[in-house]
Image (cartoon, rainbow, N blue to C red):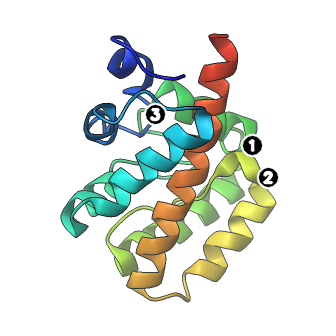
Amino acid sequence: MIGGPDFLARFGHLFEHSRWVVERTAGRAPFADAAALHAALMQTVADATPAEQLALIRAHPELGAKSVPLTEASDAEQTGAGLKALTEAEFERFAALNAAYREKFGFPFIVCVRMHNKTKIFDILSRRLNNDTATEHAQALFEIGHITRLRLADLLAATT
């Protein structure tokens, strides 16, 4: 079972600068396993207002940005995908794509970088620029689900 008095301290950082998701989910603990916990967390996100969902999306950093402070988890994930070691040409291309994405949608491009390499991330970002805002909003929340599922698995593996 997953729960207990340390629930918020243990899981509060799973969502990028958005502890509220875990706080709202805590009252439903204990959870049978990681899958049940993750499902409850994502239900909390689904039940949130559109403004809260947008704030959650906007709490994520732009991928590949040099001057943006990252959480420890985001830094490790971007490093693993090669986004912290972009060539100058790659950085310029990424910056231009990120700017076009943010201009069009009003929030940063989100993809679970642990599931892709930098070449694939470039392709996904370029392709998703063709979507509409509602599609990208839904896709961002879907990607946040992947990100938090992997972070949760890492956390549980480290503490068992």
Decide if residue 33 is on the left or right side of residue 116.
left
Which of the marked residues, 3 or 2, is nearer the chain's N terminus? 3
49 shown above or below 12: below
**Residue, x 31% and y 71% (percent of image)?**
106
The reply to whether discs 1 and 3 touch (Cβ–Cβ < 8 Å) is no
Q: Position of residue 99 (x, y in %)?
A: 44, 68
Mark 2, residue position: 117
Residue 100 visible? The answer is no
34 shown above or below 1: below
User: Which of the image's four quarters has the N terminus?
Assistant: top right
Mark nearest the camera among 2 and 1 is 2
- The type of residue carrying mark 2 is Asn
Closer to us: 71 or 41: 41
Q: Position of residue 26 (x, y in %)?
A: 32, 31
Mark 1, residue position: 82
The span from disc 3 to disc 2 (Cα, nearest Å) is: 22 Å
The span from disc 2 to disc 1 (Cα, nearest Å) is: 7 Å
The reply to whether discs 2 and 1 touch (Cβ–Cβ < 8 Å) is yes
Closer to us: 137 or 80: 137
Secondary structure at badge 2 equals: loop
Mark 3, residue position: 14
- The type of residue carrying mark 3 is Leu
Decide if residue 112 is on the left or right side of residue 148.
right
Decide if residue 40 is on the left or right side of residue 59.
right
The reply to whether discs 3 and 2 touch (Cβ–Cβ < 8 Å) is no
Q: Position of residue 4 (x, y in %)?
A: 39, 14
